[in-house]
Amino acid sequence: MVSLGVAAVAAVGARALPREEPDEVRRAREWAAMPTCADAPTLWDRQNSPRLSTGPRGGLEGGGGRLTDIDDDGYTDVLFQHSLGEEFRVFWGNAEGVLPEAAQVVPALRMTANVNGSDAGDLNHDGWPDLVGVSTEDNGFVVAPGTGNRSFGAGQRLSSGQVPVSVRLVDWNGDGLADLTYAKAPPDGRLEWRAGTGDGFRFEGGRLLTEHVDAFDIADVDGDALPDLVVADTTSVRAHKRSDDFRALPSYAEAPIPLARVSVVRVVPAEGRPIVLVGGRATPTAGGAVMWSPGTPPCKILLPEESPHDFGLFNQDTRVDFTNAASCAYCTTNYEVLVGVQ
Ligand SMILES: [Ca+2]
Ligand SMILES: [Ca+2]
Ligand SMILES: [Ca+2]
Ligand SMILES: [Ca+2]
C-alpha cells in the first residue's frame, strides 16, 4: 500500500513538470499532419519510364545522379559517377528520352559516390562541357575535360583541401564563368563557392555561402533572372537571394521540413513557378519528400517503397526515379535508374 502511495505522488509530480518533446516525436507528429500533395502522382509517375542500367549489381556503388543537358542539344542527359569504378557514366538524351543502352563510360579518377556528387558544365571556358565529381578521400574534385563531340580527356584532379561531399556548377556571380559550389564534409559542413577565372581549371575560393546544410540547389526561384540558393536540413527548407558581394542573404522564404534525414534538394521547373523538392527519410524506416513553392504551404509525397536508402543516391539497395525530365528521385531496391520522358 505504501508503494502505491509513492507511485501516485510521483505521477502527480511528473504531470506538474511537462517534459520537452523529443525531436523525433515532434517530426513524426508534424510529418503526419502535413497534407499530401494533390498533384504528386503526375510528378512521380514512373509507369512509362525507360530503365537505365548503370552498372552490374553487387559490386560497384554509384551516386551523384544529375539530370542536365550536358551537350546543350536541348535534350536532358543523365550523369552518374562510380566511386569504385573511377568513372563517370553518361546517358545521352534524345527525342525518345534517355535510352538504356546509350551509356557512355568516361574513365576518370577515384571519386566518392554522394548525392549531388557530380555535375557537368564548361569549367575551363573552352566551349566544351566538362564533367566534375567529388573525391572526399583526396580532398578535392575530379574533372573529365570535354574535348568535343561527346568525348572527354583523361581525368584530372583539382585538389582543394576542401573535402567536398557535393558539387554544383552554376554562374553564381553572373560573370559568364561557371563557379564551383560545394558542401564540405561534416563536421565542417559549410557551403562555399569558388569563382571560375577563365584560366583553365583554376578557381578562386572558397567563399562562405552559408553555414551547415544537409542539401542544396541553386536556381532562379523567384523569377528575377538571378540565381538563388535553396538549402535544407531536418528543420526547414530555405530560399536565399544573393548579396552584392555574392554571399547568401538571410532567407526570404522558408517552410518546415519534418524529415528525419534530408538527402537531396532539387529545384524543378514547373508551369508558372519552379517547385522545390526535398527528399530523404520521413521516418527511420520510410522515405518521403516535401514539395514546396515559396509563398505556398508545403505538402508531402509518400514514397511507395519502404526503406529507401538515400534519395537521389543508388547502390545495390536503391533505385533512383527521375520524372518529367526534371531532376527528382527516390530510391528503392535495385541497380536501375528510371528516367521520365516528357
Ligand atoms: Ca543533351
Ligand atoms: Ca570545358
Ligand atoms: Ca562566375
Ligand atoms: Ca532569383
Image: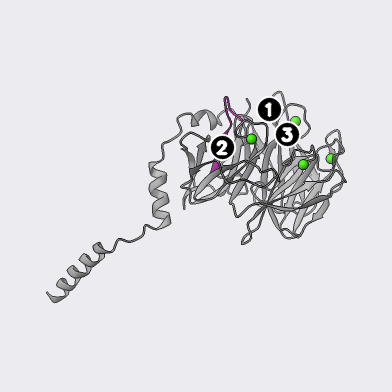
Residue 146 located left or right of residue 322: right
> Of the residues shown, which amino acid type is indicated by label 2?
Val
Q: Is residue 75 magenta?
A: no
What residue do we see at 15% from left, 71% from top?
4
- Give the number of the disc on residue 276: 2
6 shown above or below 87: below
Query: Could you classify mark 1 by the number of other residues whose Cα lies within 10 Å: few (under 14), some (14-19), or many (20 or more)?
Result: some
> Of the residues shown, which amino acid type is indicated by label 1?
Gly
Query: Could you classify mark 3 by the number of other residues whose Cα lies within 10 Å: few (under 14), some (14-19), or many (20 or more)?
Result: few
Q: Nearer the viewer, mark 2 or mark 1?
A: 2
**Which residue reaches farthest top?**
95
What residue do we see at 59% from left, 52% from top?
213
Disc 1 target residue: 97
| Image quadrant occupied by the N terminus | bottom left
- Looking at the rendering, the stretch of residues picked out in magenta corresponds to 269-279
Q: Label 1 near label 2: C-beta < 8 Å?
A: no
What residue do we see at 73% from left, 32% from top?
69
Does the beta carbon at disc 3 come under 8 Å from ligand 1? Answer: no
